[in-house]
Amino acid sequence: MKTAQEDEWLDKQLAAAPPLTVVGGPRPEPIYNRVSAQIHSAVGQFDAVNPELDHPNVLAIVNGDDGAGFTDLIQVLTGNAYCESGQVIPMFREYSEGRIREEKLRVHLYLWFNEQKPGGPQMFFPEVHAARHSALCRYLNVDSAAMKRLPG
């Protein structure tokens, strides 16, 4: 399980700055970097206890940042933006094809919980290992056939 808190980068700069001082500036997207760092860290932990993938690896992310959402996880994993029109735009490949390119395939189920919204998690099954996918669906009582598949 990993937790994500609201990004306080600008708040910390404002608190430390003298009055009437301009703060901020360009930087890499914090949400996508945080999600990919969580995946990277989790896979290192999974590999320490389950190196041969004898058991399914399930990563739960508890999100406390109201600026982040489940869509951000999907974009980091797939490298794509999915538009309501059905168009798929490959605009997040620096994350999906970066340091987590191979690591993300070692997670069989991603769960996303929002602290601000009660209810169960949103789930993403990458379906990289058919036997693990089927076992997790049975265990969680999820109908694999009814799952929405993401277009490539």
Image (spheres, grey):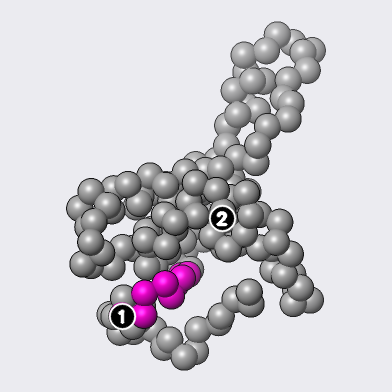
Q: Classify mark 1: helix, strand or loop.
A: helix
Categorize mark 1 by other alpha carbons within 10 Å: few (<14), some (14-19), many (20+): few
Q: Is residue 100 above or below residue 111?
A: above
Left or right for 45, reference 84? left
Left or right for 144, reference 95? left
Task: Decide whether residue 130 is among the magenta residues.
Answer: yes
The amino acid sitting under disc 1 is Ala
Q: Residue at x 73, y 20 (%)?
A: 23
Residue holding disc 2: 96
Marker disc for residue 131: 1
Task: Decide whether residue 44 is among the magenta residues.
Answer: no
* Residue 59 percent across, percent down from the top left: 37, 58
Left or right for 19, reference 147? right
* Quadrant hosting residue 140: bottom left
> Among all residues in the image, which is located at the extreme bottom?
145
* Residue 60 percent across, percent down from the top left: 38, 58
